[in-house]
Amino acid sequence: MMQLKNSIILITGSAGRIGKTTAMLLARNGAQIVLHYHSQKAKARETAGEIAAIGKQPLIVNGDLSLAETWMNIKEKILLEFGKINVLVNNSAIFYRTPFLNSTETQWDHFMSVNLKSVYLGSKILGEVMYQQKRGKIINLADVAGETIWENYIPYSVSKAGVIALTKGLAKALAPHVTVNAVSPGAVLLPDDYSEKQESYLIETTPLKRIGSPEDIAQTILFLIEGSDFITGNIVKVDGGRSLK
């Protein structure tokens, strides 16, 4: 069984939101965090300070994850500092409304590059290291929208559908040494433009009658790392049961 203590864990997009919550939880449990940011340098440094206060000083890496060069640089920094990588959490993503008839090719490319291509590149470049180590775990952040497509968020939904497909393919390609799973959040962090009426509808149509929290996602990631080494190719829905409807 993999132990969190002293495991080297890279969490992409971990300066804030779900990524930060996950980093803090894993750090509290003894993991060595590699914190990644793209543009939020000040927030990343602030998060690094908070992590250092409860655990080990994190290694900070940055860059555009849709570029193979960025991933190669991250790999080199991690291996130079620690000599290994145990877990990759592909958390970094973009999300915004794109009504279909007003959507653009640029928006489509943006979603595919940030949300999907980055997962492919990271899983290939760091997954190869894990495979050579004969041990490692990759956890991708999918979304229930990847299975129940949202008509006003089609590029986003398709990018997350791709993450789900990629997760299943990687679980086969990197077996038996590397497990690959995805966590698929439901209503956890609502879009800024959601109205009270929309929020009430979400709560009403969720069996557990509440909105989830970033902690719910972080705890699921913790379980996939430390709870079992016999789970791979799974998409774990953390949506309060809403996808049952």
Image (cartoon, rainbow, N blue to C red):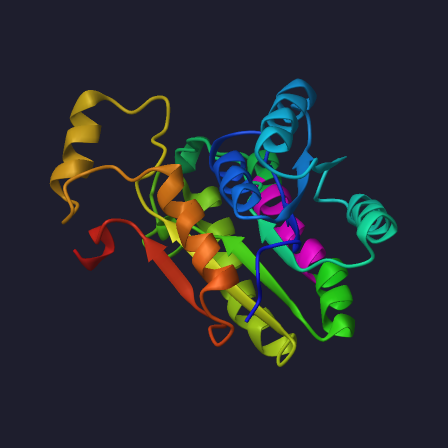
Residue 75 on image: x %, y %: 80, 51
Is the residue 134 above or below the residue 126 in the image? below
Residue 41 on image: x %, y %: 69, 22
For the image, the number of numbered tags is 0
Residue 112 is a magenta residue: yes
Q: Could you say which is closer to the camera, residue 179 or residue 160?
A: 179
Residue farthest to the top? 42
Q: Could you say which is closer to the camera, residue 150 or residue 243?
A: 243
Tell me which segment is drawn in magenta: 111-123
Q: Could you say which is closer to the camera, residue 208 or residue 116?
A: 208
Residue 140 on image: x %, y %: 53, 55
Q: Left or right: where does residue 1 sit relative to residue 213?
A: right
Q: Left or right: where does residue 62 sit relative to residue 148?
A: right
| Residue at left offset 41%, top offset 63% | 235
Is the residue 219 above or below the residue 235 in the image? above
Image quarter of the N terminus: bottom right
**Occupied quadrant, residue 115:** top right
Residue 205 is a magenta residue: no
| Residue at left offset 65%, top offset 23% | 40
